[in-house]
Image: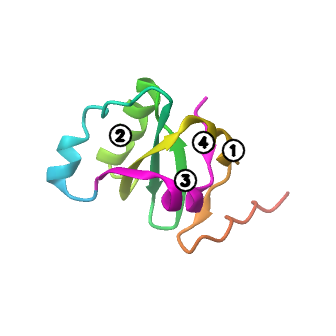
Amino acid sequence: MARYLAVAAVQREGRKALRSTTDDVAEATAEQPGIAPGERLIAVVNNGEWQSAIDVTHSIFYEKIYRRYREGIWKAMDLYYLDEKRADEMEDGRRVLMNGQPVPAPARK
């Protein structure tokens, strides 16, 4: 299962790898970028309403997220490098609205 990290912290502290909002860059990200030892590759994706930061260091997760981006499920996909230890500290499992506010929990039936 993929790990989810705090979006704002990844955007603030991560080292940007690529921004995949144009076709030229999107084609360049079809293959997972190289990852140095001790680093994690994090994809910050959004669907226009909310966003998530997902650890895509393992190629199977990268391929799945990238495929969803190319299919249009994700409107944008930004890639960040983050120190492995810091990534562990940022793990929170939440998605947030585009303005950074938490996504409300669904109503209970």
Secondary structure at badge 4 equals helix
Who's the residue at 69% across and 44% down the image?
89
Give the residue at the far right of this rendering.
Answer: 109
Depicted 8 relative to depicted 69: above or below: below
Residue indicated by mark 1: 89
The CA distance from mark 2 to mark 3 is: 14 Å
Who's the residue at 38% across and 31% down the image?
35
The CA distance from mark 1 to mark 3 is: 16 Å
Magenta stretch, residue numbers: 1-20
Residue indicated by mark 2: 66
Residue indicated by mark 4: 87
Question: Which amino acid type is marked by label 2?
Answer: Tyr
- Which of the colour schemes (rainbow, by chain, secondary structure, one colour) is used? rainbow
The CA distance from mark 3 to mark 4 is: 14 Å
| Dot placed on the residue nearer the N-terminal end, 1 or 3 | 3
Q: Are marks 4 and 1 in contact (CB under 8 Å)?
A: yes
